[in-house]
Amino acid sequence: MNVAASGRTWEEASSPDALRLTRAYEEAWQRAELAGSRLDPAEFLSRLRAGGEVPGARLAILRTDLSLRWDAGDRVSALWYLDRFPELGEDCLVALIYEEFCLLEEDGQAPETADFLARYSALAEPLRRVLDIHCLIGSATVSNSMSSKTGSKIIRSETSGNATSWAEDRCREAVKRLL
């Protein structure tokens, strides 16, 4: 994986246009859920292509879909997307795998880097870089948040109110910047 291209892909997935499309996807997801069905990301993406491709849109929408499925109790993995989108590039797949790793952590689990590298062996090298950065930043953040305790309170993010979510958000941002 070209490090510059990967960083650009992750950056494009956070662009204002891509974020606007993820909000539209979330709204379509909610409408489908109210109608008793599940939104198909391939169908949504095919409608987007008809209107012109937005750089980073596919990754942004697939990451959103992954998160929404997990919120709904459907714990799909990055492999689910690879099966449905065999044309996904390495950078997009690594981003989805990383999102899956983070969702497991947010769920209170402690995913093992070695397990992820074994499961996604074809992407072991770029995935190892991302997960190594994640672990380094996560370790530093946990250490800093523990030393920031006052009484029994941990200093919390103003946006999320949750120290763990704040740390995970910072880690995702740092990984995007470093790739």
Image (cartoon, rainbow, N blue to C red):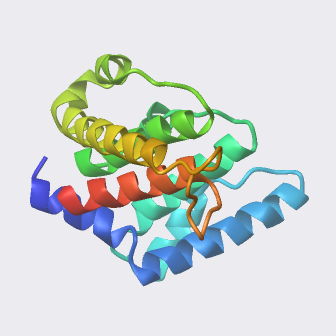
Tally of numbered tags: 0
Residue depicted at x 62% and y 63%: 160
The one of 107 and 6 positioned closer to us in this rendering: 107
**Rendered location of residue 72, percent (x, y):** 75, 44
User: Which residue corresponds to the image point at 24% horizontal and 45% vertical from the top-left?
Assistant: 90
Residue 84 shows up from this direction: no
Residue 112: percent from left, percent from top:
40, 20
User: As drawn, is 118 to the left or to the right of 50?
Assistant: left
**Is residue 159 visible to the viewer in this orientation of the structure?**
yes
Where, by quadrant of the figure, is residue 139 drawn? top left
Left or right, 154 with reference to 168: right
Q: Give the left or right position of residue 61, taking residue 6 as reference.
A: right
Picture quarter containing residue 109?
A: top right
Residue 30 vs 148, above or below: the answer is: below
For residue 44, what is the image quadrant?
Answer: bottom right
Q: Residue furthest right?
A: 35
Compared to residue 6, the image places residue 31 above or below, namely below
Q: Nearer the viewer, residue 80 or 144?
A: 144
The residue lying toward the viewer, choosing from 32 and 129, is 129
Question: Which quadrant is home to the C terminus?
Answer: bottom left
**As drawn, 85 above or below 15:** above
What x and y, as percent, mark residue 50?
48, 77
Position of residue 132 measured from the top left corner of the image (x, y, whole percent) = 24, 35
> Residue at coordinates 46% horizontally, 51% vertically from top-left?
167
